[in-house]
């Protein structure tokens, strides 16, 4: 299995978009964790994770979302999820993630949700 | 992509530079002027032998060697304009014919312009019965050619124990110390030896040699110390690493095997013969023929010498791999692929191709420096022209790219691993390497210090670029390619037709190799690369045998402890059959199943999955189990039980991990199953009444993710009213996500089909059947996740 995983960074207004590409599992989770940490430490608290090219996520990957979310929300920011493919969305749903994160169909829709002021 | 462009552009530039600069600045094309090839040399030698009386039989072995007389060339500097010296050639070709029967060895030495310089028979020429002594050739023209008239006889028919001697001399008009002699030795009317030689005593030559030694003695001394230290380090690393892992030893051994291939090539092509024969002759000369040097001994020492080289090569590579820090292990992967014979892998082709192309600019660098104002002489790319006529093996021999491999394979990774400060690292490694490089390459005259330093610096820089592009394999490939290319150019510029056609063939070969590597890079298979990388990381992580055994023993204890924690038997409930199984993916796992008995007599059926696998998950699993046991005493109902668990886990896990759980509480008398799904896989319920089999998935978040507020808001408890014959299956995602070799998942559908179509027997039988189906599906592939299964069947009552 080629555990390839890449993150593409871009911006939509003042919202940081992290586009995930590939497999997010125990091997590649540290990469993602570092990325979120970097954004958080540089003060970019509004993040949208573009999951359109995320083909697989394991519990380790899910754990990454959880690791910083509380701090980010306390600081007034949030992580919103966008464009999750059905197969991956199923995993999110089984675990109950939709209750924790705002999940939108597109990056634009997710970014727009920030416009209303604060995060969750 | 960028690397390909760089390599292609560099190759083009290098090729053009070579075309333009080679004939102007390379010593081989300026000086050698070889007019004949190997076959012709042998033929000429046979003719000369016939000329003096005995024809060598067809099956005589021929050994050919090319050498240069460097002293003569430097003497020309001391005696500029010496008419005598200038008639002597730069390059000498020795041909030695040996045959048995009436054992005989005949050797002739030729100048590159086909002039015969010497000939000699090793054994007394055999008596020819009946035949008149062959006509004595006219010696002077034979050896002196056009300058015959300059020679004056100094000895005619002087008798000595060795035979009858005739000699002529030509003394240089400008330099009385310089003279040329033609000497012929006859025995019993037959020529034993004949030849022309030059004599000169150069006091200044001696002086300048000593001067340069004094000047560079320091550098040479420093170089030797440096190399000595590096070699000692290498040996220490290699033998100490042997205790840790045999992977490095295996790697080194494969490298040695590669060298063995070269030896085979040398033997088969006859080049080995060449070297042994002349080595034997040299040894005999040194011993002054006192003792016949045994042929077999020479062969043995030849192969032993190569074996030693091979061993050193293997040691360099093995120890280099052992000290490479983790971030550079990937640089070894293509070499590992090559040594394991996995040739058709894209990474291998790509790395090789790019490095191969870079061989052209590497060969051009010395010429560039020679053409620049830094240098006023030409390049001697080949200090040893011995391979001019010995084609196949030079390529292989030069594949033992010591400098490149020694530095990039061993020294530099060692310094990265051991020396923190980058400046210190630079100082420790670069100056020594630089001096070594300069001294070994010997491309420009040692008097041109700046030019030599510049050449070495540029070469090291280019090697660096190649190393970054293509790793250790690239360093080897670029060196081979540059030598290959340079030799091709050297042959192309010799007058001999045989050598020029050799050049064309070689050029074709170079292009073929480049093309082949590019083809592999484009159309080869992907797989191997990761295998090689994984092999390395496993090798590096591999512990010594005793450490491994200790760890395995501890794992064994942990596994047994964990197995002991799981319920040993399913609860015996009248009217119900229950069975469960749990298979961790590794020695210990993060899944659990549990049976609880509540104070009110109800039975809890729980399956849980800690996110992750292995030891960390197992620790949280144990914790969860403990929490479950205690909470079950205090909780009023299923919902509050879940809240208690969530609260505790949220605090303890601290978002590092979470636990999913499917919990059912069975009331045997009312046949209800109160069910809660905390982020876990939904349970499967087959209703006997209407034959429907469906997944039941009420909302619920995983435990430990968030505080109770949000958790409770998203939690629903569902009550299933079971009928006689109903089946309920709890499982973890290790079951539905079990993968077969084709990377397909077992999936929910397959599980549903098995349960839906079941009319076999009790829960235990169904459990076994499901596990068997999974096992068959995965075809024995290693499980990637812990697998848990709990089956409950309501016994059929009529």
Image: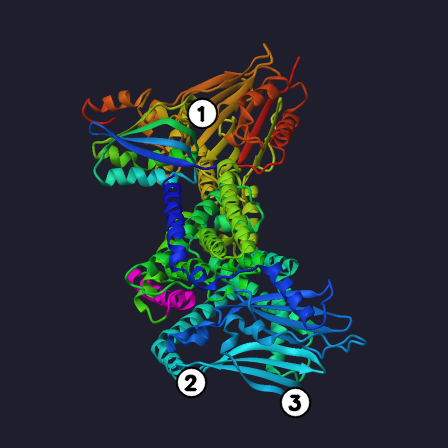
Which mark lies nearer to you, 1 or 3?
3
Outermost front residue: B149
Identify the mark at residue B677; answer none if there is no mark: 1
Work out which quarter of the rendered image holds the N terminus of chain B and state it.
top left
**Is label 2 or label 1 in front?**
2
Residue B176, numbered label: 2
Is residue B535 in view from this perspective?
Answer: no
Comparing B547 with B697, the one in front is: B547
Q: Main secondary structure of the magenta part?
A: helix
Magenta range: B421-445
Q: Is residue A20 visible?
A: yes
Residue at the spot x=43%, y=67% of the render?
Answer: B440
Q: Dot 3: within a 10 Å radius of its alpha carbon, few (fewer than 14), some, or many (20 or more) residues?
A: some
- Marks 1/3: CA distance? 117 Å
- Look at mark 3 in the image and give the residue it sits on: B159
Instruction: Tell me the SS state at disc 2.
Output: loop
Q: Splitting the image into 4 quarters, where does residue B755 fall?
A: top right
- Dot 3: what SS? strand
Q: Do circles 2 and 3 both sit on a common chain?
A: yes
The quarter of the displayed image where residue B258 is located: bottom right
Q: Chain of mark 2?
A: B
């Amino acid at each position: 299995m080629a555990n390839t995983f890449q993150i593409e960074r871009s911006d939509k207004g003042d919202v940081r978009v992290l586009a995930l590409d590939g497999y997010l599992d125990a091997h590649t989770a540290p990469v993602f964790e570092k990325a979120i940490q970097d954004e958080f430490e540089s003060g970019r608290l509004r993040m949208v994770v573009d999951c359109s090219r995320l083909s697989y996520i394991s519990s380790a990957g899910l754990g990454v979302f959880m690791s910083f979310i509380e701090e980010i929300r306390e600081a007034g920011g949030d992580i919103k999820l966008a464009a999750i493919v059905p197969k991956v969305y199923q995993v999110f749903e089984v675990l109950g993630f939709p209750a924790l994160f705002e999940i939108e169909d597109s990056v634009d829709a997710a970014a727009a949700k920030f416009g209303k002021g604060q995060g969750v | 992509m960028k690397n390909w462009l760089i390599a292609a552009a560099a190759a083009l530039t290098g090729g053009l530079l070579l075309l333009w600069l080679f004939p102007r600045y390379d010593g081989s094309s300026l000086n050698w002027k070889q007019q004949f090839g190997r076959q012709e040399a042998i033929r000429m030698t046979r003719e000369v032998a016939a000329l003096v009386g005995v024809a060598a039989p067809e099956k005589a072995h021929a050994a050919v060697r090319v050498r240069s007389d460097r002293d003569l060339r430097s003497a020309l500097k001391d005696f500029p304009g010496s008419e005598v010296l200038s008639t002597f050639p730069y390059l000498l070709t020795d041909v030695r014919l040996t045959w048995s029967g009436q054992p005989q060895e005949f050797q002739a030495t030729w100048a590159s312009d086909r002039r015969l310089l010497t000939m000699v028979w090793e054994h007394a020429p055999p008596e020819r019965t009946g035949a008149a002594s062959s006509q004595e050739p006219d010696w002077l023209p034979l050896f002196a050619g056009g300058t015959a008239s300059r020679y004056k006889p100094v000895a005619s028919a002087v008798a000595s124990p060795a035979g009858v001697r005739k000699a002529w001399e030509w003394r240089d008009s400008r330099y009385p110390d310089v003279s040329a002699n033609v000497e012929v030795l006859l025995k019993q009317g037959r020529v034993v030896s004949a030849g022309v030689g030059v004599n000169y005593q150069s006091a200044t030559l001696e002086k300048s040699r000593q001067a340069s030694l004094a000047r560079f003695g320091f550098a040479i001394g420093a170089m030797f110390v440096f190399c000595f230290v590096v070699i000692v380090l290498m040996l220490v690393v290699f033998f100490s690493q042997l205790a840790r892992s045999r992977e490095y030893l295996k790697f080194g051994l494969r490298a040695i095997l590669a060298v063995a291939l070269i030896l085979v090539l040398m033997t088969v092509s006859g080049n080995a013969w060449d070297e042994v024969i002349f080595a034997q002759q040299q040894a005999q000369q040194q011993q002054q023929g006192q003792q016949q040097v045994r042929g077999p001994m020479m062969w043995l020492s030849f192969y032993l010498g190569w074996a030693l080289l091979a061993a050193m090569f293997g040691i360099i590579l093995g120890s280099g791999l052992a000290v490479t820090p983790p971030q550079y292990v990937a640089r070894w992967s293509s070499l590992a692929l090559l040594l394991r014979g996995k040739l058709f892998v894209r990474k291998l082709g790509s790395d090789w191709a790019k490095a191969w192309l870079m061989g052209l600019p590497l060969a051009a660098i010395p010429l560039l420096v020679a053409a620049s104002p830094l240098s006023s002489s030409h390049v001697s790319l080949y200090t040893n022209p011995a391979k001019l006529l010995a084609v196949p093996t030079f390529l292989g021999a030069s594949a033992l790219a010591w400098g490149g491999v020694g530095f990039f394979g061993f020294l530099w990774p060692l310094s990265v691993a051991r020396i923190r400060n980058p400046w210190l690292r630079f100082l420790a490694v670069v100056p020594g390497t630089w001096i070594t490089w300069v001294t070994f390459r010997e491309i420009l005259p040692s008097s041109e210090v700046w030019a030599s330093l510049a050449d070495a610096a540029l070469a090291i820089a280019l090697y660096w670029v190649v190393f970054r592009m293509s790793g250790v394999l690239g360093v080897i490939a670029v060196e081979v390619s540059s030598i290959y290319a340079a030799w091709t150019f050297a042959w192309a510029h010799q007058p001999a037709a045989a050598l020029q056609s050799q050049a064309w063939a070689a050029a074709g070969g170079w292009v073929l190799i480049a093309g082949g590597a590019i083809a592999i890079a484009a159309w080869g298979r992907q797989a191997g690369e990761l295998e090689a990388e994984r092999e390395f990381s496993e090798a590096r992580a591999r512990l010594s045998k005793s450490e491994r055994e200790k760890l395995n023993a501890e794992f064994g204890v942990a596994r047994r402890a964990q197995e002991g924690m799981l319920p040993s038997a399913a609860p015996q409930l009248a009217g119900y059959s229950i069975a469960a199984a749990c298979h961790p993916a590794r020695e210990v796992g993060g899944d659990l199943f549990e049976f609880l008995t509540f104070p009110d007599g109800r039975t809890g059926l729980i399956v849980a999955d800690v996110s992750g696998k292995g030891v960390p998950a197992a620790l949280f699993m144990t914790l969860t189990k403990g929490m479950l046991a205690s909470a079950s005493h205090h909780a009023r109902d299923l919902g509050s039980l879940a809240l208690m668990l969530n609260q505790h886990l949220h605090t303890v896990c601290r978002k590092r991990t979470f636990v999913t759980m499917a919990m059912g509480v069975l009331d045997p008398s009312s046949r209800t199953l109160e069910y809660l799904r905390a982020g876990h896989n939904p349970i499967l319920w087959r209703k006997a009444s209407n034959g429907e089999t469906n997944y039941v998935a009420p909302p619920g978040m995983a435990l430990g993710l968030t505080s109770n507020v949000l958790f409770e808001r998203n939690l629903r408890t569902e009550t299933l009213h079971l009928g006689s014959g109903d089946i309920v299956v709890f499982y973890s995602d290790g079951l539905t996500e079990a993968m077969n070799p084709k990377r397909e998942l077992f999936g929910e559908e397959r599980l549903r089909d098995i349960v839906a179509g079941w009319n076999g027997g009790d829960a235990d039988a169904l459990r076994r059947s499901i596990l068997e189906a999974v096992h068959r599906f995965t075809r024995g592939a290693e499980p990637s996740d812990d697998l848990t299964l709990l089956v409950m069947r309501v016994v059929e009552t009529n």
